[in-house]
Image (tube, helix red, strand yellow):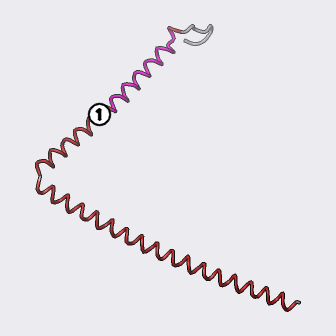
Amino acid sequence: MAQSVVEWTGDQIAEAARQGSRAATALADALEESLGATRRIAKQGGDTAEELMEDTIKRLQRHPVETAIATFSIGVATGTTIGVATGIFITRTIWFRNMTRRHFSAHGMRSLQGAPQ
């Protein structure tokens, strides 16, 4: 009886070790496969970016006037947007400050007796 329990326990340990080994192998294979896929995707992305840069350079060389006009227009639009947003922010800040001064001004509120003026 004691021998069969020891044998059974040994068999269970051996089986667990085999399953662990298979799981580790499967995990290593999956990791290797995902690294390969990541490398391929990174290479494709780099190739695509390089092609885009080459196409852009060729397009800029073929149409320099249009490029200058487009760049100037984008700069003017961006500057105008930033200027308007800044103006709105400053205007609202000043308006809010003036409204709080009017609302909490001393002439609209009662003075307290004995309080310093």
Vertical side of 91 occupied by 68: above or below? below
Q: Main secondary structure of the magenta part?
A: helix
Q: Is residue 32 left or right of residue 6?
A: left
Vertical side of 84 occupied by 6: above or below? below
Tag 1: Cα neighbours inside 10 Å, few (<14), some, or many (≥20)? few
Q: Is residue 24 left or right of residue 105?
A: right
Residue lying at 37% horizontally and 68% vertically, measured from the top left: 42
Please name the amino acid that badge 1 sits on: Gly
Residue lying at 11% horizontally and 52% vertically, measured from the top left: 64
Where does the N terminus fall, quadrant-wise?
A: bottom right
Q: Where in the figure is residue 61, as x and y percent of width and height?
A: 12, 57
Residue 72 lies in what quarter of the image?
top left
Q: What stretch is highlighted in magenta?
A: 85-107
Residue lying at 50% horizontally and 74% vertically, measured from the top left: 31
Q: Outermost residue toward the bottom?
A: 3
Vertical side of 107 occupied by 65: above or below? below
Q: Name the residue under label 1.
A: 83
Q: How many marks?
A: 1
Q: What element carries label 1?
A: helix
Q: Where in the figure is residue 74, as x and y percent of width and height?
A: 22, 42
Residue 8 lies in what quarter of the image?
bottom right
Residue lying at 54% horizontally and 12% vertically, measured from the top left: 117
Vertical side of 42 occupied by 8: above or below? below
Q: Where in the figure is residue 66, as x and y percent of width and height?
A: 13, 47
Tell which of 53 and 109 is nearer to you.
53
Magenta segment includes 82: no
Q: Where in the figure is residue 37, as x and y percent of width and height?
A: 42, 71
Tell which of 44 and 15 is nearer to you.
15
Residue 84 lies in what quarter of the image?
top left
